Image (tube, rainbow, N blue to C red):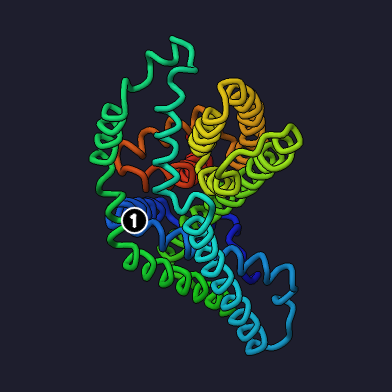
Amino acid sequence: MAVFDLSQPPNMNETLTYRHAAWLLTALFLFLALKLHLLPPLIAGLLVYHLVHLTATRLAITRLSGRNAKILAVVLVSTLIITLLVTSAIGMRTFLHHSESGGLAPFMEKLAEILESSRAALPEWIYSAMPRDAEEFKTHLAIWLREHSGELQLMGKEAGHTLAHVLIGMIIGAMLSLHEMVAIEIRKPFVVALTGRTAKFSAAFGDIVFAQVKIAAINAFFTWIYLGVVLPLAGVKLPFAATLIVVTFITGLIPIIGNIMSNTAIVIVSLGHSFQLAAASLLFLVGIHKLEYFLNAKIVGSQIKAKAWELLTAMLVMEAAFGLPGLVAAPIYYAYLKSELKESGVI
């Protein structure tokens, strides 16, 4: 049995009954992960598992002689990966809080100020679609905050609780990597069926997450080229440029919608300089947006054979059912569902 191999072909001897039971149990687990707010540790655990898998393969740890040597190497790699992930998260949070914007909250307030002060320079058709004054803008913002109060409270007041769950998820992912070192010669039919479902979900996670990280990195790179190179050469230096680049990468981890969110922020900041610059930024970002559709079709679509409208539909449904966590989970859940339907010959 190959170490870390999650792509073993399905066992043809498993009965349909066991497979149906495994499907139901997996569906229940995925539902509870969203309902009990356990999506962050689930994603963290799978991320650590895949990173350990990838690192172990590249370093040829699986070829080491001796079981104890392999286990020690995996423990060291797992510890290093968890440390790097935690350090990166802390570093990114510290950067956002100590950047030129002073944090995300002042940054959002500045966006609102730019919108209000730039109204006179906007065409009538844009002006009429915007809130009439700051009070109306605050009203719209308050409505949005009330609609997403549950998610915001979870990210705010329970941040420490969520962080503890994420760390536990990382440790579980590392332990799962260690478990792969021990070959299991005999498995009961239900265990085989359930392992197959777990392998498919893990594979779907890897396909979506690593592909989306590539897309987010490319979007952030082109945003840096525009904000950090092109505009300064043209004599324009936008405020919050570094913050916008980081926000572009973070929101870019959410397929399609994340790009729209970051694009909106960039256009608003450009509007603070001039309407002409906002229009130029919009044209540039439309080009990047088209590039993202191509990248989604090429990178994500090639992995799960899904079109952009399929992912958008799944994200719309999951967001309506589970809020912001559903929006994040939708591409992964959809990729897993599609892989199961394909294996069953339904599609």
Q: Position of residue 100 (x, y in %)?
A: 53, 51
Residue 87 visible: yes
Residue at the limit of the structure toward the top, as seen here: 124
| Residue 127: quarter of image | top left
The residue that appears at 61% across and 25% down in the rendered structure is 277
Q: Nearer the viewer, residue 138 or 161?
A: 138
Name the residue tied to disc 1: 155
Q: Is residue 250 above or below residue 264?
A: below
Q: Secondary structure at mark 1?
A: helix
- Taking the image as shown, residue 304 lies to the left or right of residue 314, namely right
Q: Nearer the viewer, residue 183 or 326?
A: 326
Residue type at mark 1? Met
Q: Position of residue 306 (x, y in %)?
A: 56, 34
Q: Is residue 291 above or below residue 340?
A: above
Badge 1: residue crowd in 10 Å (few <14, some 14–19, many ≥20): some
> Is the N terminus in the top left, top right, bottom left or bottom right quadrant?
bottom right
| Residue 238: quarter of image | top right
The residue that appears at 39% across and 41% down in the rendered structure is 109
Q: Position of residue 34 (x, y in %)?
A: 33, 52
Residue 344 visible: no
Q: Nearer the viewer, residue 252 or 48?
A: 252
Q: Is residue 128 above or below residue 238?
A: above
The residue that appears at 54% across and 30% down in the rendered structure is 267
Q: Position of residue 88 (x, y in %)?
A: 56, 65
Q: Is residue 163 above or below residue 246?
A: below
**Total residue callouts:** 1
